[in-house]
Image: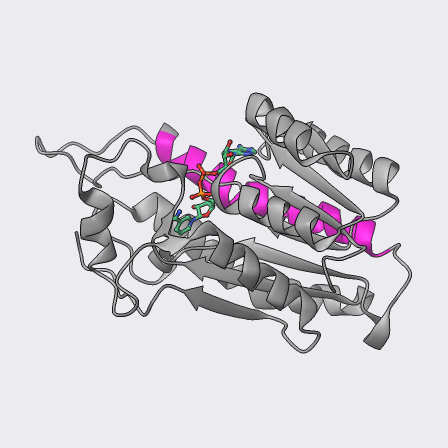
């Protein structure tokens, strides 16, 4: 599935990795790019910049009604959805017990799972339902779903129980989703990024990004959002890639802290 002449829906599409995917899809000549994001201001600003082939759809992926509406609006505007790239996600770090030996309230734990994992499944399943009505292309392919996990799925750091569980959940559901959706010709893949330079580091203290860049094997730098978008398009295009999780991380293996 090429980005050119196709319809791409990107959750978390207003910032960072998702924004890079939206930009790449527009540059590739996509027929339509739906920018689905809870941050309506940024979503509308990006769609305004990228032009008529884009549609900003303010959406909280944890609200099933909003998710349904986002997919319906995309299909109504562009006729179909060919590729979903799911990037909506939130980071969070909190130790399992605090310095006084108390377990935290569960709100934050639930929230991270709700956004990163349940939201991803809801968007994926509803988009797949829409894709199942697409006309089949070569090999009977009707669509591609690309989800975003993290190396924290494998090497969660101190304080990352919720985040790692949410991303591990995405890794775990990649193959069963691919198996389920084979019946309708939809491939499912997951990218597990390492440390990528996006607005999540905007509040980082001076020097942190450089220090983090030193923790990779090679190259010694943070990844670029454009490199993520390039991989997403490559996975969408390669018809024999399915049911797989691909790390994009300069061979990093995360330390405990
Ligand atoms: N940047 C990294 O180093 C890195 C590494 C591994 C994984 N990831 C994952 O990549 C994804 C994108 O991260 P990023 O670095 O681009 O971050 P980002 O904060 O720049 O972008 C995330 C986007 O998701 C949106 N979002 C958050 N909650 C949402 C919700 N409930 N509904 C809809 N949209 C919502 C935000 O508004 C934001 O625009 C996340 O899932 C993140 O966990 C990032």
Left-right relation of 31 to 229: right
What residue lies at 56% left-to-right and 26% top-to-bottom? 42
Determine the main secondary structure of the stretch shown in magenta: helix
What residue lies at 89% left-to-right and 54% top-to-bottom? 133
In the depicted view, which residue is nearer to us: 153 or 195? 195
Expressed as whole percent of the image width and height from the top left, the position of residue 30 reads 75, 51
What residue lies at 32% left-to-right and 54% top-to-bottom? 222
Q: Quadrant of residue 95?
A: top left
Left-right relation of 136 to 197: right
Expressed as whole percent of the image width and height from the top left, the position of residue 84 reads 67, 51
* Res 58 seen here: no
> Is residue 56 highlighted in magenta?
no
Left-right relation of 27 to 221: right
The range drawn in magenta is 108-132
Count of residue discs: 0
What residue lies at 82% left-to-right and 77% top-to-bottom? 139
């Amino acid at each position: 599935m090429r980005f050119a002449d196709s319809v791409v829906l990107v959750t978390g599409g207003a910032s960072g990795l998702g924004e890079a995917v939206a930009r790449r899809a527009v540059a590739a000549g996509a027929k339509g790019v739906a920018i689905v994001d809870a941050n309506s201001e940024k979503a509308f600003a990006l769609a305004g910049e990228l032009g008529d082939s884009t549609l900003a759809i303010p959406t909280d992926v944890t609200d099933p009604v909003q998710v349904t509406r986002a997919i319906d609006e995309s299909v109504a505007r562009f006729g179909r959805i060919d590729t979903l790239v799911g990037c909506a996600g939130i980071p969070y770090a909190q130790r399992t017990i605090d310095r006084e030996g108390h377990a935290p309230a569960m709100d934050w734990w639930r929230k991270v799972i709700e956004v990163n994992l349940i939201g991803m499944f809801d968007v994926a399943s509803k988009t797949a339902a829409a894709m199942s009505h697409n006309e089949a292309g070569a090999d009977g392919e009707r669509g591609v779903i690309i989800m975003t996990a993290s190396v924290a799925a494998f090497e969660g750091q101190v304080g990352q129980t919720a985040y790692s569980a949410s991303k591990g959940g995405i890794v775990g559901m990649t193959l069963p989703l691919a198996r389920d959706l084979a019946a309708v010709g939809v491939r499912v893949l997951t990218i597990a990024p390492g440390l990528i330079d996006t607005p999540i580091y905007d509040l980082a203290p001076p020097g942190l990004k450089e220090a983090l860049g030193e923790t990779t094997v090679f190259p010694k730098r943070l990844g670029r959002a454009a490199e993520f978008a390039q991989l997403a398009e490559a996975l969408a295009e390669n018809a024999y890639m399915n049911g797989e999780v691909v790390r994009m991380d300069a061979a990093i293996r995360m330390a405990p802290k």
